[in-house]
Image (cartoon, rainbow, N blue to C red):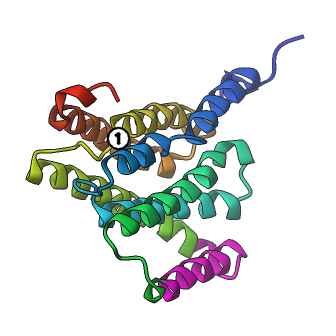
Amino acid sequence: MAASTEGGLPTSALFVINLLCVVPCVVLKVPQLWSLYASKSARGVSLPSVILELISYTIFAVYMFVHSLPLMQYAEYLFLIVQVWVVILMMLHYMDQVHFSLLPYSALYFIAVWIVGSGLTPNWFVALLLTLSTPISASGMIVQILAIYRIKDSGSVSFSSWFISWATGFLRLITFIVAGDMLVVSSYVVTNSLRAAGCAVIYYYQPSPKKFK
C-alpha cells in the first residue's frame, strides 16, 4: 500500500517536521530567560523588539486558528506567546517598570485576541493582519539587531534562542511550502533571513566566555 502524501511529502515525514518545529519551541525562550536572570539586566535586549515579536506570534496563531489549520502547524506559537510574556515581565522587572499601569495594555491585548480569534472580524481583516505581521516581525528583529550594534554587546541576548528560532523557522517554511500557503511562505522567507542575520550579530558581539551559551 502506498504511503499517504500531502503536497508530495509523505504524511509521516510531515508529522516529524511539525514535531521538530513544535518541541524545541516549548523551551525556545528558556535560554533568553536564563541570560536575563544571570545578568540581572535587560541591557542589550530591546523591549520594543520583544513586544513586536509577541504581536507577530499572536497574529500568526490567530490566523491559523481562524482558518482551522491543524494544531500541529502552529502549536509552537502558543508556547512562544506564553514564553515571550514571561520575557517581557522579566525585562520590566529588571528595568523597575512593573506597575499597575501596565494592566490596561495587557487587557487590550487579550480583548483584541478574543475578538479576532472568535471570528467576529471578517476574513479579509485577518488576512490583512497576517500581511502586516511580516513588517511587524521584521521591524522587531531589526530593532534588536540595531540595539546590539549600538552598544556593541549582546551579553543579555541569547544566541541559542535566536538559533533555535531560525532552525524551527526553516522547518516550518517547508511545511507551508507543502501546504501551498504562499502568503505565509513569503513571510517566513523574510523573517528567517533576518533571524540568520540576528544570529550572526549576536554571536559576533557576545563576550568570549559566552560564545556558545
Q: Nearer the viewer, residue 121 or 165?
A: 165
- How far from the left and from the top, in percent, is residue 187? 42, 50
The residue drawn where x is 34% and y is 64% is: 94
Q: Position of residue 70 (x, y in %)?
A: 74, 47
Q: In screen coordinates, is 141 left or right of 21?
A: left
Q: Give percent across and percent down for residue 118.
A: 72, 76
Nearest the eye: 203 or 78: 203
Give the magenta-colored segment's residue range.
Answer: 103-124
Outermost residue toward the right in this view:
1
Query: Residue at the location (48% across, 87% down)?
Result: 100
Using the image, determine if residue 99 lies above or below residue 67.
below
Can you say whether 195 is above or below 99 in the image? above
Q: Can see residue 122?
A: no
Question: In the visual, does 12 lie left or right of 51?
Answer: right
Residue at mark 1: 158
Q: Residue at x 66, y 24 (%)?
A: 8
